[in-house]
Image (cartoon, rainbow, N blue to C red):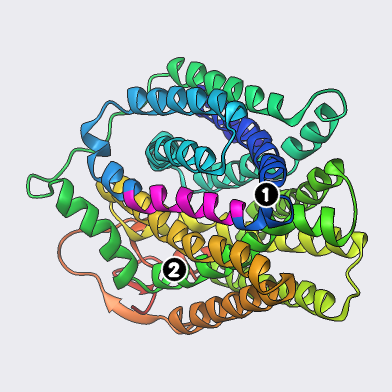
Amino acid sequence: MFRVLRDRAYRRLFTAQVVALVGTGLATVALSLLAYDLAGADASAVLGTALAIKMVAYVGVAPVIGAFADRLPRRALLVGSDLVRAVVALALPFVAEVWHVYVLIFLLQLASAAFTPAFQATIPQLLPDERDYTRALSLSRLAYDLETLLSPVLAAALLSVITYNWLFMGTALGFLASALFVLSVVLPKPQPVRPAAGPLAKAVSGARHFLTRAPLRALLAMNLSVAAAGSMVIVNTVVLVREHLGRGTGEVSLALAAFGAGSMAVALLLPSILERLSDRAVMLAGSFTLFAGSAVIGTALATGTLTWWMLLAVWAVLGAATAAVLTPTGRLIRRAVSPEDLPAAFAAQFAFSHAAWLLTYPLAGWLATVAGMTAAAVALTALALAGAIAARLLWPTTPVRRRIGSGGPRTMRHLHHAHLPRRAFRKAGQEHDVTAR
Protein backbone atom coordinates (compact mmCIF):
# COMPACT_ATOMS: atom_id res chain seq x y z
CA MET A 1 0.00 0.00 0.00
CA PHE A 2 2.72 2.46 0.98
CA ARG A 3 4.55 2.12 -2.35
CA VAL A 4 2.40 4.91 -3.73
CA LEU A 5 4.18 7.33 -1.37
CA ARG A 6 7.20 7.14 -3.66
CA ASP A 7 5.45 9.72 -5.81
CA ARG A 8 6.81 13.00 -4.45
CA ALA A 9 3.76 15.14 -5.23
CA TYR A 10 1.31 12.65 -3.78
CA ARG A 11 3.50 12.08 -0.72
CA ARG A 12 3.44 15.78 0.13
CA LEU A 13 -0.27 16.12 -0.49
CA PHE A 14 -0.91 13.08 1.69
CA THR A 15 1.21 14.63 4.43
CA ALA A 16 -0.80 17.85 4.11
CA GLN A 17 -3.99 15.84 4.52
CA VAL A 18 -2.66 14.01 7.59
CA VAL A 19 -1.55 17.10 9.50
CA ALA A 20 -4.76 18.96 8.70
CA LEU A 21 -6.89 16.04 9.85
CA VAL A 22 -4.95 15.58 13.07
CA GLY A 23 -5.67 19.23 13.79
CA THR A 24 -9.32 18.71 12.91
CA GLY A 25 -9.45 15.76 15.31
CA LEU A 26 -8.14 17.92 18.13
CA ALA A 27 -10.87 20.43 17.34
CA THR A 28 -13.52 17.69 17.44
CA VAL A 29 -12.55 16.74 21.00
CA ALA A 30 -12.23 20.37 22.08
CA LEU A 31 -15.58 21.29 20.54
CA SER A 32 -17.30 18.44 22.42
CA LEU A 33 -15.86 19.63 25.71
CA LEU A 34 -16.66 23.27 24.90
CA ALA A 35 -20.27 22.29 24.21
CA TYR A 36 -20.40 20.40 27.51
CA ASP A 37 -19.08 23.48 29.35
CA LEU A 38 -21.64 25.74 27.69
CA ALA A 39 -24.67 23.44 27.92
CA GLY A 40 -23.94 20.60 30.34
CA ALA A 41 -26.26 17.63 29.81
CA ASP A 42 -27.73 19.44 26.76
CA ALA A 43 -24.37 19.26 24.99
CA SER A 44 -25.80 16.77 22.47
CA ALA A 45 -28.24 19.41 21.24
CA VAL A 46 -25.48 22.02 20.88
CA LEU A 47 -23.20 19.60 19.04
CA GLY A 48 -26.03 18.35 16.84
CA THR A 49 -26.93 21.90 15.82
CA ALA A 50 -23.31 22.94 15.25
CA LEU A 51 -22.66 19.91 13.08
CA ALA A 52 -25.92 20.45 11.17
CA ILE A 53 -24.68 23.97 10.37
CA LYS A 54 -21.47 22.37 9.15
CA MET A 55 -23.49 20.18 6.79
CA VAL A 56 -25.46 23.16 5.46
CA ALA A 57 -22.16 24.73 4.44
CA TYR A 58 -21.03 21.49 2.81
CA VAL A 59 -24.25 20.80 0.93
CA GLY A 60 -24.69 24.36 -0.28
CA VAL A 61 -21.11 25.24 -1.18
CA ALA A 62 -19.40 22.04 -2.36
CA PRO A 63 -21.31 21.67 -5.68
CA VAL A 64 -20.66 25.32 -6.54
CA ILE A 65 -16.95 25.01 -5.77
CA GLY A 66 -16.81 21.78 -7.76
CA ALA A 67 -18.38 23.49 -10.75
CA PHE A 68 -15.74 26.23 -10.70
CA ALA A 69 -12.82 24.02 -9.64
CA ASP A 70 -11.42 23.69 -13.15
CA ARG A 71 -11.45 27.49 -13.57
CA LEU A 72 -9.57 28.33 -10.35
CA PRO A 73 -5.86 27.88 -9.60
CA ARG A 74 -6.05 24.66 -7.61
CA ARG A 75 -3.07 25.31 -5.36
CA ALA A 76 -4.34 28.80 -4.48
CA LEU A 77 -7.77 27.36 -3.68
CA LEU A 78 -6.32 24.71 -1.35
CA VAL A 79 -3.90 27.05 0.43
CA GLY A 80 -6.51 29.80 0.82
CA SER A 81 -8.94 27.32 2.36
CA ASP A 82 -6.31 26.18 4.87
CA LEU A 83 -5.53 29.74 5.91
CA VAL A 84 -9.19 30.57 6.50
CA ARG A 85 -9.60 27.44 8.61
CA ALA A 86 -6.53 28.33 10.70
CA VAL A 87 -7.89 31.80 11.49
CA VAL A 88 -11.27 30.43 12.55
CA ALA A 89 -9.67 27.77 14.76
CA LEU A 90 -7.71 30.48 16.58
CA ALA A 91 -10.98 32.32 17.32
CA LEU A 92 -12.85 29.33 18.81
CA PRO A 93 -11.22 29.44 22.30
CA PHE A 94 -12.64 32.94 22.84
CA VAL A 95 -16.33 32.12 22.40
CA ALA A 96 -18.64 32.82 25.34
CA GLU A 97 -22.05 32.08 23.82
CA VAL A 98 -23.47 29.11 21.97
CA TRP A 99 -24.30 31.20 18.91
CA HIS A 100 -20.64 32.18 18.61
CA VAL A 101 -19.85 28.50 18.11
CA TYR A 102 -22.44 28.24 15.36
CA VAL A 103 -21.07 31.22 13.40
CA LEU A 104 -17.45 30.10 13.60
CA ILE A 105 -18.29 26.50 12.68
CA PHE A 106 -20.13 27.75 9.60
CA LEU A 107 -17.12 29.79 8.46
CA LEU A 108 -14.75 26.91 9.13
CA GLN A 109 -16.81 24.48 7.11
CA LEU A 110 -17.25 26.87 4.21
CA ALA A 111 -13.49 26.66 3.79
CA SER A 112 -13.51 22.87 4.19
CA ALA A 113 -16.25 22.62 1.54
CA ALA A 114 -13.90 24.37 -0.86
CA PHE A 115 -10.83 22.32 0.10
CA THR A 116 -12.02 18.72 0.16
CA PRO A 117 -13.58 18.21 -3.33
CA ALA A 118 -10.66 20.02 -4.99
CA PHE A 119 -8.20 17.83 -3.09
CA GLN A 120 -10.09 14.63 -3.96
CA ALA A 121 -10.23 15.50 -7.66
CA THR A 122 -6.47 16.09 -7.75
CA ILE A 123 -5.44 12.59 -6.60
CA PRO A 124 -6.70 10.55 -9.60
CA GLN A 125 -4.84 12.97 -11.89
CA LEU A 126 -1.63 12.43 -9.94
CA LEU A 127 -2.11 8.63 -9.88
CA PRO A 128 -3.76 7.44 -13.11
CA ASP A 129 -2.99 3.75 -12.47
CA GLU A 130 -5.99 1.90 -11.00
CA ARG A 131 -4.02 -0.02 -8.36
CA ASP A 132 -2.06 3.03 -7.29
CA TYR A 133 -5.29 4.98 -6.95
CA THR A 134 -6.83 2.18 -4.86
CA ARG A 135 -3.82 2.30 -2.54
CA ALA A 136 -4.17 6.07 -2.33
CA LEU A 137 -7.83 5.71 -1.37
CA SER A 138 -6.90 3.36 1.46
CA LEU A 139 -4.19 5.75 2.62
CA SER A 140 -6.70 8.59 2.48
CA ARG A 141 -9.06 6.53 4.64
CA LEU A 142 -6.19 6.00 7.07
CA ALA A 143 -5.64 9.74 7.16
CA TYR A 144 -9.26 10.28 8.11
CA ASP A 145 -8.90 7.59 10.74
CA LEU A 146 -6.07 9.55 12.31
CA GLU A 147 -8.70 12.19 13.07
CA THR A 148 -10.61 9.66 15.17
CA LEU A 149 -7.70 7.63 16.52
CA LEU A 150 -4.45 9.57 16.89
CA SER A 151 -6.09 12.94 17.56
CA PRO A 152 -8.23 11.77 20.50
CA VAL A 153 -5.29 9.90 22.03
CA LEU A 154 -3.11 12.98 21.57
CA ALA A 155 -5.90 15.12 23.00
CA ALA A 156 -6.22 12.83 26.04
CA ALA A 157 -2.48 13.20 26.69
CA LEU A 158 -2.55 16.97 26.24
CA LEU A 159 -5.60 17.39 28.46
CA SER A 160 -3.57 16.04 31.35
CA VAL A 161 -1.36 19.15 31.25
CA ILE A 162 -3.42 21.86 29.47
CA THR A 163 -7.05 22.96 29.19
CA TYR A 164 -9.07 21.98 26.14
CA ASN A 165 -9.02 25.54 24.74
CA TRP A 166 -5.36 25.05 23.83
CA LEU A 167 -6.33 22.17 21.55
CA PHE A 168 -7.68 24.72 19.10
CA MET A 169 -4.13 26.06 18.75
CA GLY A 170 -3.07 22.60 17.57
CA THR A 171 -5.87 22.72 15.01
CA ALA A 172 -4.61 26.03 13.62
CA LEU A 173 -1.05 24.72 13.42
CA GLY A 174 -2.30 21.68 11.49
CA PHE A 175 -3.98 23.85 8.87
CA LEU A 176 -0.91 26.08 8.52
CA ALA A 177 1.33 23.04 8.04
CA SER A 178 -1.09 21.69 5.43
CA ALA A 179 -0.88 24.96 3.50
CA LEU A 180 2.94 24.80 3.49
CA PHE A 181 2.97 21.25 2.14
CA VAL A 182 0.52 22.16 -0.64
CA LEU A 183 2.71 25.12 -1.57
CA SER A 184 5.70 22.80 -1.93
CA VAL A 185 4.30 20.87 -4.91
CA VAL A 186 3.21 21.67 -8.45
CA LEU A 187 -0.30 20.34 -8.96
CA PRO A 188 -1.63 19.06 -12.30
CA LYS A 189 -3.87 21.39 -14.20
CA PRO A 190 -7.57 20.49 -14.25
CA GLN A 191 -8.79 18.61 -17.30
CA PRO A 192 -9.96 20.95 -20.09
CA VAL A 193 -13.66 21.70 -20.01
CA ARG A 194 -15.90 20.95 -22.95
CA PRO A 195 -17.10 24.24 -24.50
CA ALA A 196 -20.73 23.59 -23.65
CA ALA A 197 -20.04 22.64 -20.04
CA GLY A 198 -20.32 25.83 -18.02
CA PRO A 199 -20.26 25.94 -14.20
CA LEU A 200 -24.01 25.45 -13.80
CA ALA A 201 -24.08 22.59 -16.29
CA LYS A 202 -21.16 20.92 -14.52
CA ALA A 203 -22.83 21.24 -11.12
CA VAL A 204 -25.99 19.62 -12.51
CA SER A 205 -24.00 16.91 -14.33
CA GLY A 206 -22.26 15.93 -11.10
CA ALA A 207 -25.62 15.24 -9.48
CA ARG A 208 -26.96 13.54 -12.62
CA HIS A 209 -24.21 10.91 -12.48
CA PHE A 210 -25.49 9.81 -9.07
CA LEU A 211 -29.05 9.47 -10.31
CA THR A 212 -28.34 7.50 -13.50
CA ARG A 213 -25.74 4.91 -12.45
CA ALA A 214 -26.62 1.96 -10.22
CA PRO A 215 -23.47 1.90 -8.05
CA LEU A 216 -23.71 5.63 -7.41
CA ARG A 217 -27.41 5.43 -6.61
CA ALA A 218 -26.57 2.73 -4.07
CA LEU A 219 -23.81 4.94 -2.71
CA LEU A 220 -26.41 7.60 -1.94
CA ALA A 221 -28.28 5.09 0.22
CA MET A 222 -25.11 3.84 1.93
CA ASN A 223 -24.26 7.44 2.81
CA LEU A 224 -27.38 7.41 4.99
CA SER A 225 -26.22 4.30 6.86
CA VAL A 226 -22.79 5.82 7.47
CA ALA A 227 -24.29 9.09 8.68
CA ALA A 228 -26.82 7.41 10.99
CA ALA A 229 -24.23 5.30 12.78
CA GLY A 230 -21.55 7.99 12.72
CA SER A 231 -23.84 10.64 14.20
CA MET A 232 -24.48 8.47 17.23
CA VAL A 233 -20.73 8.26 17.77
CA ILE A 234 -19.76 11.86 17.08
CA VAL A 235 -22.69 13.66 18.70
CA ASN A 236 -23.49 11.47 21.68
CA THR A 237 -20.17 10.00 22.81
CA VAL A 238 -19.49 12.86 25.23
CA VAL A 239 -22.88 12.46 26.94
CA LEU A 240 -22.73 8.65 26.96
CA VAL A 241 -19.28 8.71 28.58
CA ARG A 242 -19.78 11.60 31.00
CA GLU A 243 -23.45 11.20 31.98
CA HIS A 244 -24.39 7.54 31.39
CA LEU A 245 -21.08 5.91 32.34
CA GLY A 246 -19.81 8.59 34.74
CA ARG A 247 -16.31 8.79 33.28
CA GLY A 248 -13.96 11.73 32.71
CA THR A 249 -12.81 13.84 29.77
CA GLY A 250 -9.93 11.52 28.93
CA GLU A 251 -12.33 8.62 28.35
CA VAL A 252 -14.26 10.73 25.83
CA SER A 253 -11.09 10.81 23.72
CA LEU A 254 -10.50 7.09 24.18
CA ALA A 255 -14.04 6.21 23.08
CA LEU A 256 -13.61 8.25 19.90
CA ALA A 257 -10.22 6.60 19.39
CA ALA A 258 -11.87 3.15 19.45
CA PHE A 259 -14.01 4.19 16.49
CA GLY A 260 -10.89 5.30 14.62
CA ALA A 261 -9.00 2.11 15.49
CA GLY A 262 -11.68 -0.05 13.90
CA SER A 263 -11.74 2.09 10.80
CA MET A 264 -7.96 2.06 10.45
CA ALA A 265 -7.73 -1.72 10.78
CA VAL A 266 -10.13 -2.25 7.89
CA ALA A 267 -8.57 0.46 5.74
CA LEU A 268 -5.18 -1.29 6.04
CA LEU A 269 -6.67 -4.59 4.88
CA LEU A 270 -8.89 -3.31 2.07
CA PRO A 271 -6.37 -3.11 -0.83
CA SER A 272 -5.79 -6.87 -0.63
CA ILE A 273 -9.45 -7.60 0.10
CA LEU A 274 -10.57 -5.65 -2.96
CA GLU A 275 -8.32 -7.82 -5.11
CA ARG A 276 -10.51 -10.81 -4.22
CA LEU A 277 -13.93 -9.36 -3.45
CA SER A 278 -16.03 -6.88 -5.37
CA ASP A 279 -16.61 -3.34 -4.18
CA ARG A 280 -20.29 -4.20 -3.96
CA ALA A 281 -19.77 -7.11 -1.56
CA VAL A 282 -17.47 -5.13 0.73
CA MET A 283 -19.58 -1.98 0.82
CA LEU A 284 -22.92 -3.72 1.36
CA ALA A 285 -21.41 -5.83 4.15
CA GLY A 286 -20.22 -2.61 5.76
CA SER A 287 -23.67 -1.05 5.46
CA PHE A 288 -25.45 -3.94 7.19
CA THR A 289 -22.76 -4.03 9.89
CA LEU A 290 -23.48 -0.37 10.60
CA PHE A 291 -27.08 -1.34 11.25
CA ALA A 292 -26.10 -4.28 13.45
CA GLY A 293 -23.73 -2.21 15.59
CA SER A 294 -26.31 0.53 16.01
CA ALA A 295 -28.90 -2.05 17.03
CA VAL A 296 -26.58 -3.42 19.73
CA ILE A 297 -26.02 -0.01 21.29
CA GLY A 298 -29.75 0.79 21.16
CA THR A 299 -30.61 -2.50 22.85
CA ALA A 300 -28.00 -1.94 25.56
CA LEU A 301 -29.39 1.52 26.30
CA ALA A 302 -32.97 0.25 26.40
CA THR A 303 -32.10 -2.56 28.82
CA GLY A 304 -29.65 -0.57 30.93
CA THR A 305 -26.79 -2.98 30.18
CA LEU A 306 -24.38 -0.56 28.50
CA THR A 307 -20.85 -0.82 29.89
CA TRP A 308 -17.61 0.98 29.14
CA TRP A 309 -16.05 -1.99 27.37
CA MET A 310 -19.20 -2.65 25.35
CA LEU A 311 -19.16 0.95 24.17
CA LEU A 312 -15.54 0.65 23.06
CA ALA A 313 -16.22 -2.62 21.21
CA VAL A 314 -19.29 -1.32 19.38
CA TRP A 315 -17.56 1.93 18.43
CA ALA A 316 -14.66 -0.10 16.97
CA VAL A 317 -17.08 -2.22 14.93
CA LEU A 318 -18.86 0.87 13.64
CA GLY A 319 -15.52 2.39 12.66
CA ALA A 320 -14.56 -0.75 10.74
CA ALA A 321 -17.89 -0.81 8.90
CA THR A 322 -17.58 2.88 8.04
CA ALA A 323 -14.20 2.27 6.41
CA ALA A 324 -15.61 -0.65 4.43
CA VAL A 325 -18.23 1.65 2.92
CA LEU A 326 -16.25 4.84 2.42
CA THR A 327 -12.85 3.63 1.22
CA PRO A 328 -13.96 2.28 -2.20
CA THR A 329 -16.18 5.27 -3.05
CA GLY A 330 -13.44 7.01 -5.03
CA ARG A 331 -13.13 3.92 -7.24
CA LEU A 332 -16.85 3.98 -7.99
CA ILE A 333 -16.78 7.64 -8.94
CA ARG A 334 -13.62 7.37 -11.00
CA ARG A 335 -15.06 4.50 -13.05
CA ALA A 336 -18.43 6.16 -13.53
CA VAL A 337 -17.40 9.51 -15.00
CA SER A 338 -14.93 10.93 -17.48
CA PRO A 339 -11.75 12.66 -16.20
CA GLU A 340 -13.01 16.17 -16.90
CA ASP A 341 -16.13 15.48 -14.81
CA LEU A 342 -14.24 14.26 -11.74
CA PRO A 343 -14.29 17.59 -9.81
CA ALA A 344 -18.06 17.95 -10.26
CA ALA A 345 -18.67 14.29 -9.40
CA PHE A 346 -16.56 14.40 -6.25
CA ALA A 347 -18.28 17.64 -5.26
CA ALA A 348 -21.66 15.96 -5.79
CA GLN A 349 -20.65 13.04 -3.56
CA PHE A 350 -19.37 15.50 -0.98
CA ALA A 351 -22.70 17.33 -1.00
CA PHE A 352 -24.93 14.24 -1.11
CA SER A 353 -23.05 12.42 1.65
CA HIS A 354 -23.16 15.45 3.90
CA ALA A 355 -26.85 15.96 3.17
CA ALA A 356 -27.33 12.65 4.99
CA TRP A 357 -25.31 14.00 7.92
CA LEU A 358 -27.45 17.14 7.80
CA LEU A 359 -30.42 14.89 8.63
CA THR A 360 -28.75 12.68 11.22
CA TYR A 361 -26.65 15.17 13.20
CA PRO A 362 -29.58 17.23 14.56
CA LEU A 363 -31.67 14.08 14.92
CA ALA A 364 -28.97 12.49 17.11
CA GLY A 365 -28.53 15.62 19.20
CA TRP A 366 -32.03 16.92 19.70
CA LEU A 367 -33.75 13.56 19.98
CA ALA A 368 -31.26 12.51 22.66
CA THR A 369 -31.94 15.74 24.55
CA VAL A 370 -35.74 15.77 24.21
CA ALA A 371 -36.72 12.10 24.13
CA GLY A 372 -33.68 10.39 25.63
CA MET A 373 -30.60 8.59 24.37
CA THR A 374 -32.46 5.34 23.77
CA ALA A 375 -34.95 7.02 21.42
CA ALA A 376 -32.08 8.61 19.48
CA ALA A 377 -30.31 5.24 19.16
CA VAL A 378 -33.47 3.49 17.92
CA ALA A 379 -34.22 6.18 15.33
CA LEU A 380 -30.67 6.15 13.99
CA THR A 381 -30.67 2.35 13.86
CA ALA A 382 -33.82 2.46 11.73
CA LEU A 383 -32.16 4.91 9.33
CA ALA A 384 -29.05 2.73 9.09
CA LEU A 385 -31.19 -0.28 8.19
CA ALA A 386 -33.19 1.69 5.62
CA GLY A 387 -29.99 2.83 3.93
CA ALA A 388 -28.54 -0.68 3.81
CA ILE A 389 -31.70 -2.23 2.36
CA ALA A 390 -32.07 0.54 -0.24
CA ALA A 391 -28.44 0.12 -1.31
CA ARG A 392 -28.95 -3.64 -1.72
CA LEU A 393 -32.00 -3.07 -3.93
CA LEU A 394 -30.46 -0.24 -5.98
CA TRP A 395 -27.26 -2.14 -6.80
CA PRO A 396 -28.27 -5.34 -8.64
CA THR A 397 -25.94 -8.31 -8.81
CA THR A 398 -26.81 -9.41 -12.35
CA PRO A 399 -24.88 -7.52 -15.04
CA VAL A 400 -26.42 -6.76 -18.39
CA ARG A 401 -24.54 -7.17 -21.65
CA ARG A 402 -24.04 -4.23 -23.91
CA ARG A 403 -22.05 -3.92 -27.08
CA ILE A 404 -19.72 -0.97 -27.12
CA GLY A 405 -20.54 1.35 -30.00
CA SER A 406 -18.27 2.58 -32.75
CA GLY A 407 -17.12 5.59 -30.76
CA GLY A 408 -13.85 3.85 -29.98
CA PRO A 409 -12.65 1.72 -27.09
CA ARG A 410 -13.39 2.77 -23.56
CA THR A 411 -11.17 2.27 -20.55
CA MET A 412 -12.22 0.02 -17.70
CA ARG A 413 -12.77 2.87 -15.33
CA HIS A 414 -15.44 4.35 -17.61
CA LEU A 415 -17.48 1.14 -17.44
CA HIS A 416 -19.90 1.02 -14.56
CA HIS A 417 -18.69 -2.28 -13.19
CA ALA A 418 -17.89 -1.43 -9.60
CA HIS A 419 -19.66 -4.49 -8.21
CA LEU A 420 -17.56 -7.00 -10.16
CA PRO A 421 -14.19 -8.51 -9.20
CA ARG A 422 -11.13 -7.29 -11.08
CA ARG A 423 -10.71 -10.58 -12.93
CA ALA A 424 -14.03 -10.04 -14.73
CA PHE A 425 -12.40 -7.32 -16.82
CA ARG A 426 -9.56 -9.30 -18.28
CA LYS A 427 -11.64 -10.45 -21.23
CA ALA A 428 -10.71 -9.09 -24.61
CA GLY A 429 -13.12 -8.13 -27.37
CA GLN A 430 -15.92 -5.71 -27.94
CA GLU A 431 -18.42 -7.08 -25.40
CA HIS A 432 -18.11 -6.13 -21.72
CA ASP A 433 -20.14 -6.64 -18.60
CA VAL A 434 -21.44 -3.39 -17.20
CA THR A 435 -23.56 -2.69 -14.19
CA ALA A 436 -27.29 -2.57 -14.75
CA ARG A 437 -28.53 0.97 -14.52
Residue 86 point in image, percent of width and height? 51, 24
Kind of residue at disc 2:
Leu
Extent of the magenta region: 46-60
Which residue of the protein is positioned furthest toward the left in this rendering? 196
Kind of residue at disc 1:
Ala
**Image quarter hosting the C terminus:** bottom left
Q: Is residue 148 magenta?
A: no
Horizontal side of 316 relative to 351 (left or right) equals right
Label 1 crowding class (10 Å Cα cut-off): few <14, some 14-19, many 20+?
Answer: some
Horizontal side of 418 relative to 270 (left or right) equals left
Q: Is residue 248 at least partly visible in the picture?
A: yes
Q: Compared with residue 44, is residue 434 higher up or lower down, i.e. above or below?
A: below
Q: Which residue is mark 1?
A: 39
Q: Nearer the viewer, residue 373 or 403?
A: 373
Q: Nearer the viewer, residue 278 or 304?
A: 304
Q: Compared with residue 320, is residue 437 higher up or lower down, i.e. above or below?
A: below
User: Between disc 1 and disc 2, whose residue precedes?
Assistant: 1
Residue at (68, 77) in percent of width and height? 375
Q: Quadrant of residue 328?
A: bottom right
Mark 1 and 2 residues: CB-CB less than 8 Å, in contact?
no
Judging from the image, what secondary structure is the residue with disc 1 in?
helix
Label 2 crowding class (10 Å Cα cut-off): few <14, some 14-19, many 20+?
Answer: many
Q: Compared with residue 46, is residue 388 higher up or lower down, i.e. above or below?
A: below
Q: Which residue is mark 2?
A: 220
